[in-house]
Amino acid sequence: MKKDLRDIINNYIILHAESSDIYVIAVDSAISSNLYIFRSQLGHRFIDVGVAEQNAFDIAAGLAREGATVFVFGISTFLLYRGYEQLRSIICENKLKVIFIGLWCGLYYSDQGYTHLQIDDINVTRSLPNLNIYSPYSDLSTKRCLDDAFEHQGPSYFRIENPLPESDYLDLHITSDSSALNGSVTLAILATGQSVKRSLLASEYLKSNLNLNISVHPLCDLDVKRLQSSTQKYVRHYQNLLIVEEHLAFCGTGASIGFSWSVKQAGSRIHCLGVGDLIVRNQTYDRALEFHKLNAHGIINKCINILES
């Protein structure tokens, strides 16, 4: 049975908490972040600041300056934007080891209004110094991203969309090794988060029904330098790349890849499939995916349009 990504993260923290001097700070999110097990077992390392993101960041910075590794949990929109000044000027600038778990990203909260809709965080965070950005797509990739963040001597941001077991996160792992290039050289899909599974469904449909062999490659590391490094072989190998993500299309991962490689005047044509300029308030998550053509059907049609053009 597929696990809750919050449990995977929490179990990882519990395993390393005492030996690695880890603290957990919740921004009024002990329940929504599923932190009750950590709180019951390691209450002396747990702090709930309530609705006070800036206070949470200041406390995290203080603990990190004393050598601790600090995890901060919260709803991503509130976590990132209410504490942005502290994140930028104190934590990132000083390379403090604070790991932010931003939950319910993408279109998940489409029924809660614009305040809860986290569709521009990649654009905001990629400009911050020393910050690693992760968008895991499966159980195992989450653990590997945690290992990487734990080794990083600086802050990290996890972009978690819907962590619940019924989400579109995969319960299996596919390679993200860019040396393993396959499928048609005409088009490949690069996807983040839950869009990886939907892209795989689209790829399977295109292969079985239209005999089109379009490979899917997950992207987990989204900070600027590592994203450019991890995508260089894709850009050189495929004529077209379709980047699929639950983020504003004009300023997300696809835009970053397109800009990086247009400067070099070489490589693939970059196509972005993400959230459009028009945001419809208060609709269900599934309806929002359909509206922005981010479900499997929309990805299939986008691939066909690219190939026909």
Image (cartoon, rainbow, N blue to C red):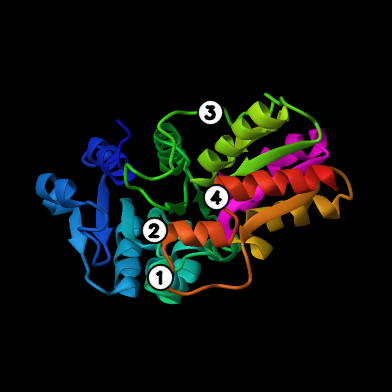
Mark 2 touches mark 1? (CB < 8 Å): yes
Q: Earlier in the sequence, mark 4 or mark 2?
A: 2
The residue tagged 1 is: 116
Residue on which the image places disc 3: 174
Estimate the spatial distance between the alpha carbons at disc 3 and disc 1, rounded to whole Å: 31 Å
- Residue 38, how many percent across, how many down? 18, 47
Q: Which badge, 3 or 2, is on the more N-terminal residue?
A: 2
Q: Residue at x 48, y 41 (%)?
A: 137
Badge 3 marks a residue whose secondary structure is loop
Specify few, some or many for label 2: CA neighbours under 10 Å numbering under 14, 14-19, or 20 or more. many
Distance (Cα) linking label 3 and label 2: 23 Å
Marks 4 and 2, how far apart at CA? 17 Å
Residue 60 lies left or right of residue 160; in this view the side is left
Of the residues under marks 3 and 4, which one precedes in the sequence? Answer: 3
Secondary structure of residue under mark 1: helix
Residue toward you, 178 or 47:
178
The crowding category of the residue bearing disc 4, from other C-alpha atoms within 10 Å (few below 14, some 14 to 19, many at least 20), is many
Q: Which residue is mark 4?
A: 295
Residue 129 visible within the image:
no
Which callout, 3 or 4, points to the residue nearer the camera? Answer: 4
Closer to the N terminus: mark 1 or mark 4? 1
Give, as a single range, the part of the protein colored magenta: 220-247
* Residue type, label 1: His
Inter-mark Cα distance, 1 to 4: 21 Å
Residue at 38% across / 67% down in the picture? Answer: 79
